[in-house]
Image: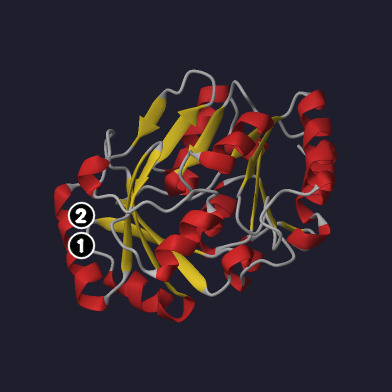
Amino acid sequence: MLPLICIDVDGTLLGSSGVPTDGVWTAAEAAIARGQHLAICTARVAVGPTWDYARRLDPAGWHIFHSGAALINAETLEVDGEVVDEATITACERLAVEHGWVLEYYSAFEIACPSTEPLAVEHAGLLGLAHQPRSRDDLTGPLVRLQFVVPIEDTDAVLAAVPAGAQGTAATSPALDHAAFISVTKAGVSKATAIAKLAHRLGFGPEAVMMVGDGQNDVSAMESVGWGVAMGNADPTALAASRLQVGHVDDDGLADALTLSVDLG
């Protein structure tokens, strides 16, 4: 049985309905009862329903947010974070103005987005939040991540424009399938580096870890662990990087992965 399972959110925990299914919760509760550690591993911020999901999966454990830029303990609220430098922030702000891209600012538990564009409003809704335009200065914690929210056809252009010295990763959501989310973090930060930190904290090697995901931003994480699992709806790059494949997110593929974990390791 694998002791640690890291779970992506959009396209893995959440499908087109925007909420986890009863089948997924049943499988997760069975894994928790077996003593397995279930950790959120997402680009999302630790607020709203996403934070609730993390606490339900492991109320006293560590979870990965902000594409690996913040490891957060659900019980103590301790944050092990990686801060974005000012040069990267300035460069991203310049890109947002030049191209008309929506730019969001994040601390571990907060989001600030000054834009009133439809994509900004839609993204807040996806996170289960009411959109309230806010500036970077409204954040009370260190800035761990920036994010461009753009039409999905602009994904490659944004990734190509990510400032030197920063890390850019792309994600999508089946619940907002016309948009792409490009996270910008400190160079070298990824879901994979955060999983390594988490496994070390728990005393496990990477071979004892399963990562379940579907997106381009899950690839390095899948490759870094013993058991990379791709959802049936996964991006081709994630499928290629995986060791196992399970069903589509809307067919409870995550539940299949949790069941498979019992006989692995």
Q: Quadrant of the N terminus?
A: top right
Q: Residue furthest bottom?
A: 153
Camera-side residue of 189 and 111? 111
Give the residue at x 50% y 48%: 129
Task: Indicate the quadrant where residue 133 lies.
Answer: bottom left
Where residue 12 sits: x, y (%)? 67, 54
Looking at the rendered structure, which numbered label has been put on residue 89?
2
Label 2 environment density (alpha carbons within 10 Å; few <14, some 14–19, many ≥20): some
The vertical placement of 144 against 165, above or below, is above
Say few, some or many: other residues with alpha carbon within 10 Å of mark 1 (under 14 / 14 to 19 / 20 or more): some
Say what secondary structure mark 2 lies in: helix
Please tell me in which quadrant of the rendered image residue 113 appears.
Answer: bottom left
The percent coordinates of residue 230 (x first, y second) are: 69, 59
Which residue: 48% across, 18% down?
76
Taking 65 as reference, is 164 above or below it? below
Measured from the top left, where is residue 63 in percent x and y? 54, 34
- Figure label count: 2
State the mark number for residue 93.
1
CB atoms of marks 1 and 2 within 8 Å:
yes
| Apparent side of residue 263 relative to residue 217 in the rendered image (left or right) | right
Where is residue 17? Give x, y as percent.
Answer: 71, 59
Position of the C terminus by quadrant: top right
- Up/down of 42 relative to 150, above or below: above
Residue type, label 2? Ile
The one nearer the camera, 92 or 119, is 119
User: From the viewer's perspective, is residue 4 above or below residue 14?
Assistant: above
